């Protein structure tokens, strides 16, 4: 049974900077949900609230009807796994041991044979078995990213949140990872939330897209509802054509070569995300 996410009257910010006000959102069905929007509109901030990293200024986030602020971090970790965009974590341990860290919320520091089997399965899913005994600190940025996704999968969460999981990956691995996440959401009946800047990748694989802009939800629904020339113009200040490819919208951007970065910034221009 899927763990439901509900946000009611949610206000979020940092110090004097307000990012969200009166956000209301339900995510109650399993599937891959893409979170879209320009830099600074609060995509990562929204995820922080869903993981109790950031306390709301106002309003409430509920997980299955329970106010997340009343939950212990250990109990949250049994339901929610969060994979940040970039991690400063360095581990003088093997890739396998790093992935095994995802089992700690469930098994504590007592490793079982089942924990090892789950970690190895997650390495196979990410095509990392040949790196299992390599030192984590020796990996490339792309390999590092894939190991952190495997660690999140090893947690076996009901809600898996990933902040730009394909940012350090080449085109093949971007597609592979997004397809894998879509299939995991479907097969395991869980919610997978992915922050993504590539509209075409998100459109191709997400079951639902949530487009954010200036502290509100600009569009929410299937890709054909969200990925439109009007929404792209309103949110990103970009002209684009949207065509159908394999049954999904595909964006072709028009670039005005005479315009510099400073002249027409996108709608969400703050650098806080």
Image (spheres, rainbow, N blue to C red):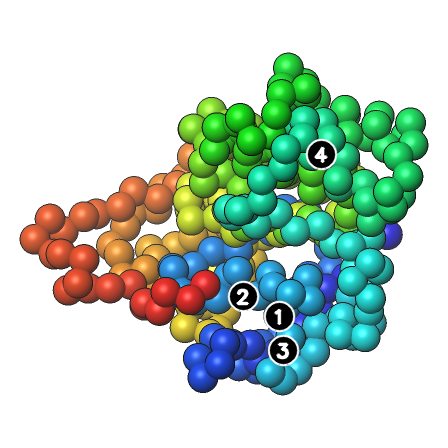
Q: Nearer the viewer, mark 2 or mark 1?
A: 1
Q: Secondary structure at mark 4?
A: helix
Q: Nearer the viewer, mark 4 or mark 2?
A: 4
Measured as percent of width and height from the top left, residue 200 is found at 42, 41
Cα–Cα span, label 3 and label 2: 10 Å
Cα–Cα span, label 4 and label 2: 25 Å
Q: Which residue is at 84% across, 25% downward?
A: 117
Instruction: Say which label, 2 or 1, has the lower sequence index.
Output: 2
Cα–Cα span, label 3 and label 4: 31 Å
Instruction: Say which label, 3 or 4, has the lower sequence index.
Output: 3
Q: Is residue 118 left or right of residue 97?
A: right
Which residue is label 1 attached to? 54
Instruction: Say which label, 3 or 2, has the lower sequence index.
Output: 2
Cα–Cα span, label 4 and label 1: 25 Å
Contact between labelled residues 1 and 2, with CB atoms less than 8 Å apart: yes
Say if residue 88 shows up in the picture. yes
Which residue is label 2 attached to? 45
Q: Secondary structure at mark 3?
A: loop
- Residue 56's tag is 3
Q: Which residue is at 82% across, 66% downward?
A: 72
Q: Is residue 269 left or right of residue 248?
A: left
Instruction: Say which label, 4 or 1, has the lower sequence index.
Output: 1
Q: Quadrant of residue 51?
A: bottom right
Contact between labelled residues 1 and 3, with CB atoms less than 8 Å apart: yes
Say if residue 179 shows up in the picture. no
Q: Secondary structure at mark 1?
A: loop
- Residue 99's tag is 4
Other-residue count near label 1 (Cα within 10 Å), few / some / many at <14 / 14–19 / ≥20 = some
Measured as percent of width and height from the top left, residue 105 is found at 82, 49
């Amino acid at each position: 049974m899927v763990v439901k996410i509900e946000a009611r009257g949610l206000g979020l910010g940092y110090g004097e900077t307000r990012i969200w006000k009166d956000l209301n959102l339900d995510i109650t069905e399993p599937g891959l949900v893409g979170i879209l929007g320009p830099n600074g509109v609060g995509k990562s901030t929204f995820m922080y609230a869903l993981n109790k990293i950031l306390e709301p200024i106002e309003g409430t986030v509920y997980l299955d009807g329970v106010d997340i602020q009343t939950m212990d971090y250990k109990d949250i970790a049994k339901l929610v796994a969060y994979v940040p965009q970039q991690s400063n974590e360095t581990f003088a341990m093997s890739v396998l041991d790093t992935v095994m860290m995802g089992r700690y919320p469930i098994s504590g520091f007592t490793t079982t044979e089942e924990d090892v089997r789950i970690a190895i399965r997650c390495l196979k899913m990410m095509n990392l078995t040949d790196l299992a005994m390599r030192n984590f600190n020796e990996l490339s940025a792309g390999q590092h990213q894939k190991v952190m996704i495997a660690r999140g999968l090893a947690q076996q969460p009901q809600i898996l949140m990933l902040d730009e999981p394909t940012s350090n990956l080449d085109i093949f691995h971007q597609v592979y990872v997004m397809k894998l996440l879509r299939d995991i959401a479907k097969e395991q009946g869980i919610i997978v939330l992915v922050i993504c800047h590539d509209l075409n990748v998100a459109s191709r694989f997400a079951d639902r897209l949530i487009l954010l802009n200036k502290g509100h939800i600009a569009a929410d629904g299937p890709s054909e509802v969200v990925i439109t020339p009007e929404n792209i113009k309103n949110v990103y200040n970009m002209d684009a054509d949207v065509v159908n490819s394999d049954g999904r919208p595909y964006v072709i951007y028009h670039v005005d070569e005479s315009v510099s970065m400073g002249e027409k910034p996108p709608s969400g221009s703050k650098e806080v995300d």
